[in-house]
């Protein structure tokens, strides 16, 4: 058997309050590219279930751009490194250069694909650098800035020019190559956040935290106009993008609006349409934008990507989102003939996905406290968070119904719900376990050893608790008390995860020493051994609905699927499933498995006979 990638539910761009983000596109293929953590994500605006993740940066990636011919991508990170790699052919690395001593904030290709300019933070006055893409040799000197340079742009027609803007409020104009400082414009009274040339190179525009947009002549760098103050933005303007014909621009702002401006021949701009963010509160601030073909793309601080039609601005936008942080919690269930996946990330965001469709909305909870673990059984969501509270929430489609919460008073380790008796839940903490019935605490037991994982049998009659010492302690449940029945010793590291098979005939355990074990529930004997194929700790495991397969996910980025009726050597290995490690696993059916991880992405894999 083999595991084939079926669908990818991509993460959204990393955002940061008070800073714009840069997304770029390839108009020929309707692709966009952006960064999240160490990942560079390629997505297609018309194919939401397709995504490509490039994860070769050693540090957090900040910006990525397609080359003008669409064949190459240049991506940069916080260490000042630029990697140039192939979009196809397994992302072959063309070159890697350390070009600045600090974070790179923007990057642009020359129209002939021969040169790249970057801007950002550096030592002394080294905030901008332009170089040949094949050799890394400098193609100019960039004086004139005294602080971090937030944005740069390459004139898309000859004679070549480069413009930059930054935290010193300046807009600088350079002639070349080799490029030399020509002039500075001091039109802004706050951070100049983004600068872009029109497609024909005749004009360029800068936008700023002073809420203004200034237009300049593309050949001389002289100011020719500005965006009208009538109906202008009421907050910092973070990004700007030109229409393909160069007659309009799209701007986004902290005031939660995007505006389409018509640019007249004189160089002044008037608002044509104001588009409001679909999110409320701080998360509704708009921090990134892109005008690509007929698509107007905006990105909010909360990671919601909205697509408007440039030819029909009255049309409601198509919005999609995902996770921004590591995804550890996964739950799968059927609803109305559809397979629904719920996923929770470290920042407390719970996203609803539908197999074959993708993003289907976020669950709006009363509070977005961080979640350590969660479970869904019979339409009820149970969460255990870092606020020490267990919450039991009735799910009503994509809405949250009534909520009950209990303060456990200590930090969570694990959460399990008895599938055949969903009112019964087992919570594990550092020193013991807590038994719940509905929203009532049945018992709080200090077990006398450091607890690291736990599981409850489907009928709620038995509990297994794993310890720091690598032992599995098996207890029978009698009312609100636990009676120890046996202790199993096989693991050589702290237990990280325990799960019963759906038919309760077996249970599986994994440890920090990279080993997994499948046990016979009745005899307590090892049923499948030598499961030592990961190269780092096991973070999660899941059973297939028919109890014939068990899958493990590891810090080594791999997922391994075992058939419990065959030797462990008869396994399926998915290498590089998630950059940074696999933290969540769930079977959708007997032949489909869902995985999630540090890269904030979710993937569906189809198990097929070879």
Image: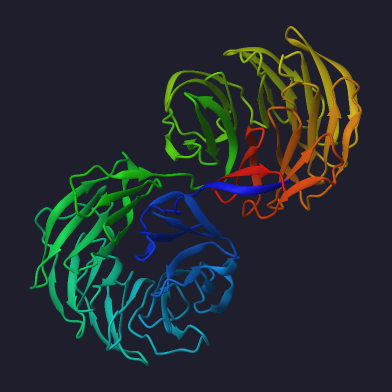
Q: Residue 363, percent across and down?
A: 44, 31
Closer to the camera in the image, 58 or 333: 333
The residue lying furthest to the bottom in this view is 178
Along the line of sight, which residue is nearer the eye, 101 or 105?
A: 105
Query: In x, y percent, where is residue 394?
Result: 48, 19
Say above or below: 423 vs 428. Answer: above
> Can see residue 125?
no
Q: How is the image coloured?
A: rainbow
Residue 571, located in which quarter of the rendered image? top right
Which residue ends up furthest to the front in the rendered image? 610
Q: Position of residue 372 (x, y in %)?
A: 60, 35
Taking 502 as reference, is 181 above or below it?
below
Q: Is residue 103 above or below residue 400?
A: below
User: How many labels were placed on the picture?
Assistant: 0
At 74% from the left edge and 6% from the top edge, which residue is drawn? 479
Q: Residue at x 21, y 44 (%)?
A: 315
Q: Is residue 602 visible?
A: yes
**Residue drawn at (54%, 37%), measured in percent from left and top?**
344
In which quadrant of the rendered view does residue 528 lie? top right
* Quarter of the image where the N terminus is located: top right
85 shown above or below 609: below
Q: Percent position (x, y) of residue 500?
A: 75, 26
Q: Nearer the viewer, residue 167 or 77?
A: 77
* Quarter of the figure with residue 96: bottom right
């Amino acid at each position: 058997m083999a595991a084939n990638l079926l669908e990818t539910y991509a993460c959204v761009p990393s955002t940061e309050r008070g800073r714009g983000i840069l997304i770029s596109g390839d108009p020929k293929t309707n692709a966009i590219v952006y960064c999240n953590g160490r990942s560079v994500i390629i997505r297609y605006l018309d194919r939401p279930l397709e995504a490509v993740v490039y994860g070769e940066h050693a540090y957090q990636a900040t910006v990525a751009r397609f080359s003008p011919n669409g064949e190459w991508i240049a991506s940069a990170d916080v260490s000042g490194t630029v990697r140039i790699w192939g979009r196809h052919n397994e992302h072959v690395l063309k070159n890697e250069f350390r070009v600045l001593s600090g974070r790179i904030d923007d990057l642009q290709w020359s129209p002939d694909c021969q040169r790249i300019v970057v801007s950002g933070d550096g030592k002394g006055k080294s905030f901008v650098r332009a170089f040949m893409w094949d050799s890394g040799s400098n193609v100019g000197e960039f004086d004139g800035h005294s602080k971090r340079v937030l944005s740069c742009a390459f004139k898309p027609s000859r004679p070549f020019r480069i413009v930059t803007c930054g935290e010193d409020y300046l807009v600088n104009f350079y002639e070349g190559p080799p490029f030399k400082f020509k002039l500075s414009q001091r039109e802004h009274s706050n951070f100049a956040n983004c600068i872009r040339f029109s497609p024909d190179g005749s004009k360029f525009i800068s936008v700023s935290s002073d809420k203004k947009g200034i237009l300049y002549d593309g050949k001389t760098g002289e100011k020719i106009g500005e965006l009208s103050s009538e109906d202008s933005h009421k907050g910092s303007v973070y990004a700007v993008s030109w229409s393909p014909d160069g007659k309009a621009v799209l701007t986004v702002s902290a005031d939660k609006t995007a505006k389409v401006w018509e640019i007249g021949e004189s160089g002044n701009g008037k608002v044509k349409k104001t588009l409001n963010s679909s999110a409320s509160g701080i998360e509704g601030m708009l921090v990134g934008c892109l005008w690509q073909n007929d698509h107007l793309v905006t990105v909010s601080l909360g990671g919601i990507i909205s697509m408007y039609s440039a030819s029909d601005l009255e049309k409601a936008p198509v919005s999609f989102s995902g996770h921004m942080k590591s995804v550890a919690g996964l739950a799968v269930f059927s609803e109305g003939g559809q397979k629904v996946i719920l996923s929770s990330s470290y920042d407390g965001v719970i996203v609803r996905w539908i197999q074959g469709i993708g993003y289907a909305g976020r669950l709006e909870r009363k509070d977005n406290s961080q979640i350590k673990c969660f479970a869904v059984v019979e339409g009820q969501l149970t969460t255990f968070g870092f606020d020490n509270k267990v919450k039991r929430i009735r799910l009503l489609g994509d809405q949250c119904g009534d909520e009950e919460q209990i303060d456990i008073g200590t930090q969570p380790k694990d959460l399990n719900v008895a599938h055949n008796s969903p009112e019964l839940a087992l919570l594990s903490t550092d020193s013991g376990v807590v038994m719940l019935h509905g929203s009532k605490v049945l018992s709080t037991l200090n077990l006398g050893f450091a607890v690291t994982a736990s599981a409850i049998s489907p009928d709620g009659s038995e509990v297994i608790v794993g310890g720091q010492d690598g032992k599995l302690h098996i207890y029978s449940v009698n009312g609100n008390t636990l009676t120890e029945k046996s202790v199993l010793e096989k693991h050589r590291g702290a237990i990280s995860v325990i799960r019963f098979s759906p038919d309760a005939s077996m249970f599986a355990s994994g440890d920090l020493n990279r080993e997994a074990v499948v046990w016979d529930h009745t005899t307590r004997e090892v049923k499948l051994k030598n499961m030592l194929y990961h190269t780092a700790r096991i973070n999660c495991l899941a059973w297939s609905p028919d109890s014939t397969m068990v899958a493990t996910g590891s810090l080594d980025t791999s997922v391994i699927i075992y058939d419990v009726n065959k030797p462990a050597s008869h396994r399926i290995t998915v290498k590089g499933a998630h950059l940074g490690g696999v933290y969540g696993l769930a079977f959708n059916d007997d032949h489909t498995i869902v995985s999630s991880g540090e890269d904030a992405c979710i993937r569906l894999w189809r198990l097929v006979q070879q």
